[in-house]
Amino acid sequence: MDQVAAHWFAEGERATAVGLVTLANLLGIAVGCSRVRPLCGDVDRAAQYVYAAAAVVSAILFVALAREYPPTPSGPAARGRKR
């Protein structure tokens, strides 16, 4: 994550970006765990299918949309890096 933050965010914003990603990760886990029973009732196999479908959709979107470098450099430190 540090390399991605270095490419996408200015130097003063990198710690905030890493912190927000970490927070989003933990909140996503909490929301996912809390939604199993309301979505699937007592059927554990159905919960696994819901998680699997969400993971597949997320992975496809990430592969399709994620880029290592932004269209414009975030600052002087990012300008010298290879693309």
Image (cartoon, rainbow, N blue to C red):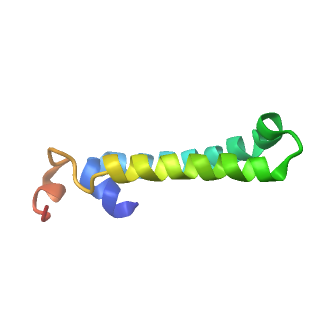
Q: Is residue 38 above or below residue 63?
A: above
Q: Is residue 45 left or right of residue 78?
A: right
Q: Is residue 82 left or right of residue 11?
A: left
Name the foreground residue: 51 vs 10: 51
Is residue 18 visible from the viewing direction of this image?
no
Q: Is residue 3 left or right of residue 44?
A: left
- Tell me which residue sits at (78%, 43%) in the image: 36
Total tally of numbered discs in the picture: 0
- Tell me which residue sits at (79%, 53%) in the image: 45
User: Whole-percent x and y of residue 37?
Assistant: 83, 40
Q: Is residue 83 above or below residue 74?
A: below
Of all residues, the one furthest to the right in this rendering is: 42
User: Whole-percent x and y of residue 7?
Assistant: 25, 55
Name the foreground residue: 71 vs 76: 71
Name the foreground residue: 62 vs 73: 62
User: Whole-percent x and y of residue 30?
Assistant: 71, 45
- Tell me which residue sits at (50%, 46%) in the image: 57
Q: Is residue 54 above or below residue 80?
A: above
Query: Residue 24 appears in which quarter of the rendering?
Result: top right
- Tell me which residue sits at (69%, 44%) in the image: 32
Is residue 63 visible from the viewing direction of this image?
yes
Quadrant (top left/top right/bottom left/bottom right) for the C terminus:
bottom left
User: Whole-percent x and y of residue 78?
Assistant: 17, 56
Name the foreground residue: 2 vs 31: 31
Quadrant (top left/top right/bottom left/bottom right) for the N terminus:
bottom left
Q: Is residue 5 left or right of residue 37?
A: left
